[in-house]
Amino acid sequence: MRQDEETRSLVNKAPRDPDAARPSFLVTVVSGADRGMVFELDGGQASRALVGGSPACTVRLTDPLVSRRHAALEVELDGLRVQDLGSKNGTVVNGLRVADALLAGGEVVRVGSTMLRVERLAKVTSTKATSAMAFGRVVGASLEMRRLYPLCQELARSDVPVLIEGETGTGKELLAESLHEKGPRAAGPFVVFDCASVSGSAALASLFGVDGGAPGAFEQARGGTILLDEVAELDAEAQAGLLDALGQRRVLREGASAWTPIDVRILVASRRDLDAEVQAGRFREDVLRCLAESARIELPPLRRRQGDVGLLARHFWRVIGGGDNLPADFSARLETYVWPGNVRELANVVARRFASGDDGALASPKAELSDPSLHAALETILESDMPFSRARAAALAEFERRYVARVLARHGGHVGRAAAASGIARRYFQMLRGRSSR
């Protein structure tokens, strides 16, 4: 039987039950600098396996023609999916360059000058590891999420740094808060540090404090957990301080001559591809290595979470006081949208429908951009001739102030409901509220 016929046969015979046992595959490097290396992939893995030269990759190669994050491999019911991740030299399957392909086993994949042979194994893996529909504040019953929960439970019990990656709005902050609340440090503080909010020496002082002055975020989180949100925004000096904190479990306060031991669990979140940031010279490779070699979680976008749109919509509807009867026409419409803003966008749309009853909720966020006062505020910032970093910070502060005010108004000043409708952690919402009121 020819290879393409084998693939079609596998697809046609694949079971449709999302909880059905999944196949396993063996990936062997058959030529190239890493010849002889072998990797086993099975359906029980929490997330897709990355192929490339980065320490974040499961299949890590030394071939200089392989990109840092070259491709991704993910076991599905139908076979092994390979996706090129925008690599410089492309991904080639059986001589054909592909962006996304489903493999049955028996194929040869070329990345850079390295050849990988994919073999389907006899063993299968059951994916019924958990029937949970949530992990702490993170809600989702899709297979993509349920495969993550056992890993999340394991990491919650540990004290290792965790790198949480995912698109904007996928729930990185909520996952970080849940890891904290389900871990041994739950009684301690949970501090969110927005790395995009400060730069330069201010970032260093805000993180580590000033000798003889106010404590930094690490000191505030002592005995608990700190989340460094959007870590790619840290400048070089702050990244160096973070490396010391990760590797030596101690920090150097700005202006001090002595190191201070830290008793803090470090969680890091990023919507950006940190390997691309390393390649561009904006992020330190040793910091990424320290993070990736500890633990890494990749949150899937909402468009890949089959069945979770309806589940989440009903959850948000109940949280904001709508009861158990989400309007059927609205629910059906939600299923047809692609959700570029992910879970956060869904939460905002549900909140808007609850507040206004407007069936045009999916399009209405654009209407807010026509607010004359918002235009005036942005124009004032643009005309100020401030440096880019300060102008961006001012624009962000204006947005935060308006957003917090509106969502609180919709929910009668109830912080818990406002945070839930916003799709962000309650402590983070309170931080935004405090910052916007100054």
Image (spheres, rainbow, N blue to C red):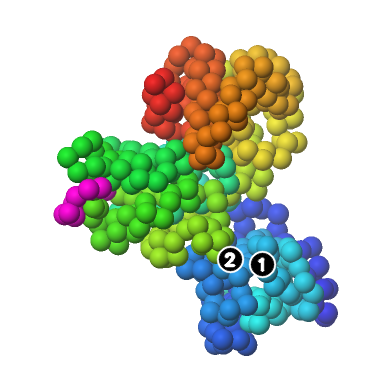
N-terminal-most mark, 1 or 2: 2
- x 65%, y 62%: residue: 85
Q: CA distance from mark 1 to mark 2?
A: 7 Å
Q: Is residue 322 visible?
A: yes
Amino acid carrying label 1: it is Ser
CB-based contact (under 8 Å), mark 1 and mark 2: yes
Single out the residue that lies furthest toward the front. Answer: 385
Which segment did they paint magenta?
Answer: 254-264
Q: Quadrant of the C terminus?
A: top left
Instruction: Answer whether residue 347 is magenta in the image.
Output: no
Compared across the picture, whether 26 is left or right of 334 comes to left
Please provide percent x and percent y for residue 20. Answer: 62, 57
Residue 402 image offset from top left, x and y in percent:
54, 21
Instruction: Using the rendered view, name the quadrant where residue 289 is placed.
Output: bottom left
- Quarter of the image where the N terminus is located: bottom right
Q: Residue placed at 63% from the left, 38% from the top?
A: 341
Which residue is label 2 attached to? 69
> Mainly helix, strand or loop, the magenta region?
loop
| Residue 200 location (% of width, % of height) | 40, 46
Numbered label attached to residue 24 = none
Relative vertical location of residue 430 with respect to residue 91 in this rendering, above or below: above
Return the residue nearer the eye: 61 or 150: 61
Vertical relation: 256 (above or below) 194? below
SS label for mark 1: loop
- Disc 2 residue crowd, few under 14, some 14–19, many 20+, Cα 10 Å: many
Mark 1 sits on what residue? 87
Q: Nearer the viewer, residue 321 or 346?
A: 346
The residue under the point 49% across, 65% down is: 56
